[in-house]
């Protein structure tokens, strides 16, 4: 009985831990963490397809593309921000890189 209870609690804690979202902000000390934009520039708003929520947009450090937070009926996840014709919206790569 005790082993079943411990196994059940362990399984429950692992399931709950998988639901926790960690929000980290980029800093000079942590360049590989996505940077969340405080405000989305007007030109990005004009390019983005209308069905995307622009209240939370971030720049992915690995590709320089913008991603928005999509809150669906089952989960909340980051999706690539796309133009009206379906192309991803990305920042210019650093020429020195």
Image (tube, helix red, strand yellow):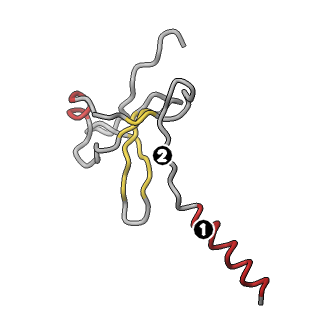
Residue at the image position 40 percent from the left and 41 percent from the top: 80
Q: Residue 91 carries which label?
A: none
Q: In which quarter of the image is residue 1?
A: bottom right
Question: What is the x, y in percent for residue 25?
Answer: 47, 36
Q: Do the residues labelled 2 and 1 touch (CB within 8 Å)?
A: no
Q: 22 or 82: which is nearer to us?
A: 22
Q: What element carries label 2?
A: loop
- Label 1 residue SS: helix
Q: Residue at x 28, y 34 (%)?
A: 39
Answer left or right for 79 relative to 83: right
Q: Quadrant of residue 7?
A: bottom right
Q: Say if 79 sits above or below 6 in the image.
A: above
Quarter of the picture containing the C terminus is top right
Residue 94 in the figure: left or right of residue 55:
right
The furthest residue to the bottom: 1
Label 2 packing within 10 angstroms: few (<14), some (14-19), many (20+): few
Q: How crowded is mark 1: few (under 14 residues within 10 Å), some or many (20 or more)?
A: few
The residue pinned by badge 1 equals 15
Residue 11 x, y percent position in the rendering: 67, 72
User: How many numbered marks have been drawn onto this rendered protein structure?
Assistant: 2
Marks 2/1: CA–CA distance: 19 Å
Mark 2 vs mark 1, foreground winner is 2
Give the x, y percent position of residue 49. 25, 41
Q: Residue beneath label 2, please?
A: 23
In the rendered image, the residue lying farthest to the top is: 96
Residue at 28 percent of width and 38 percent of height: 85
Of the residues under marks 2 and 1, which one precedes in the sequence? Answer: 1
């Amino acid at each position: 009985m005790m082993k079943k209870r411990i196994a059940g609690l362990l399984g429950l804690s692992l399931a709950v831990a998988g639901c926790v979202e960690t929000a980290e902000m980029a800093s000079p000390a942590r360049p590989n963490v996505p940077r969340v934009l405080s405000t989305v520039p007007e030109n990005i708003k004009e390019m983005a397809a209308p069905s995307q929520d622009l209240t939370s947009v971030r720049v992915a450090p690995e590709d320089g593309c913008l991603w928005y937070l999509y809150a669906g009926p089952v989960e909340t996840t980051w999706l690539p921000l796309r133009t009206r014709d379906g192309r991803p919206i990305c920042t210019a790569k650093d020429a020195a890189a």
